[in-house]
Image (tube, grey):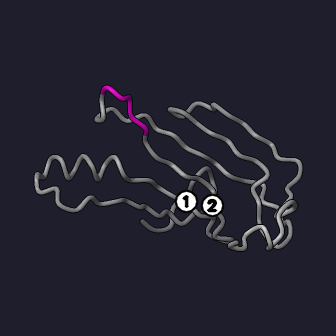
Amino acid sequence: MGQETLDGATVQHLRATRTVPGKSDPATAALLLDLATFDLYLDAGTFLPAELAFNTHPSSNALQHVPIAIQLSGYQRESGIMAPMHVQKFLQRSLLIDISVTSVAINSGLSPADFQIQ
C-alpha cells in the first residue's frame, strides 16, 4: 500500500489477502476476499511490526466488520531477536488488552535434540 503515518510514526503499510480459487460468483468472491484481508504496518526505519489490523465478524453477519488492531512497541534485543515489550489489543478502537513485558527468554528450555526425529 505504501508509506503512511500511523499514530505519528512513519510506517510501511502492507495489505495481505487470501484468495479462494473456484469462486466464480462475483459477490461471493468479493465477500471471501473481504473476509480474508489484513493490514500490517512496519516501522519505516526498522521494518519491525508496529500494528496488525483486521476485521472480525459476528457469526450471524459476515458483512458486519468489527475492527481489531494489535499494536507492538518498545522493542528490545534479546539473544539476537527483537521482541516487543509492549502489546496492546484494540477492539472497535477501544483498548481491550494492555500487556507490558518485563523480560524475554528465547529458546531457554529446549535443546536442538528435542527436535530430532526418533
Where does the N terminus fall, quadrant-wise? bottom left
Q: For residue 47, which quarter of the picture?
A: bottom right
Which class describes the residues within 10 Å of circle 2: few (<14), some (14-19), or many (20+)?
Answer: some
Report which residue position mark 1 lands on. Answer: 41
For the point 63% across and 32% down, the residue is: 95
Q: Verify whether residue 19 appears in magenta.
A: no
Which class describes the residues within 10 Å of circle 1: few (<14), some (14-19), or many (20+)?
Answer: many
Which amino acid type is marked by label 2? Pro
Q: Is residue 108 left or right of residue 56?
A: right
Judging depth in this view, the residue of 106 and 8 nearest the camera is 106
Report which residue position mark 2 lands on. Answer: 49
Judging depth in this view, the residue of 80 and 6 nearest the camera is 80
* Above-or-below relation of 46 to 76: below
Q: Which residues lie in the magenta part?
A: 56-60
Residues at discs 1 and 2 in contact (Cβ within 8 Å)? yes
For the point 80% across and 72% down, the residue is: 113
Where does the C terminus fall, quadrant-wise? bottom right
